[in-house]
Amino acid sequence: MNSTEQANSESHYLLLVVAIVIGITGVYLRFADFHYSSFIANIILIIGVLIALKAVFAILK
């Protein structure tokens, strides 16, 4: 498999979609009204960003 086919692999883009959904969940949780909502939202957003960066670097590799 050459590098173009590997970069266009469906698994990379599924990982990006999952990362975006996790990130959006983190953003929406900022508006929730419970005790540690901002802290939990930040953690979820960071997890989404890390997953997205992993997918992007896998595509660039």
Image: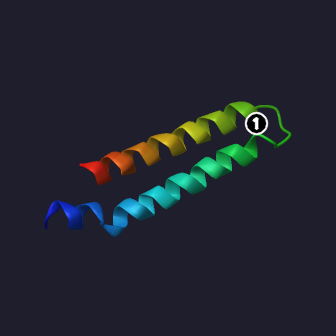
Total tally of numbered discs in the picture: 1
Q: Is residue 23 left or right of residue 59?
A: right
Front-most of residues 34 and 29: 29
Residue displayed at 45% across by 46% down: 51
Q: Is residue 49 left or right of residue 59?
A: right
Residue 39 location, quadrant: top right
Residue farthest to the right, as pictured:
33
Q: Position of residue 41 (x, y in %)?
A: 68, 38
Q: Is residue 21 left or right of residue 28?
A: left
Q: Residues within 10 Å of mark 1 (few under 14, many from 20)?
A: some
Q: Position of residue 6 (x, y in %)?
A: 23, 63
Q: Secondary structure at mark 1?
A: helix
Residue displayed at 86% across by 40% down: 33
Q: Amino acid at mark 1?
A: Ser
- Check the image and tell me how it is coloured: rainbow
Residue highlighted by disc 1: 37
In the depicted structure, whether residue 43 falls above or below residue 13: above
* Quadrant assignment for the N terminus: bottom left
Residue displayed at 76% across by 36% down: 37
Residue farthest to the front, as pictured:
4
Q: Position of residue 44 (x, y in %)?
A: 60, 41
Residue displayed at 31% across by 54% down: 59
Q: Position of residue 13 (x, y in %)?
A: 41, 62
Front-most of residues 33 and 16: 16
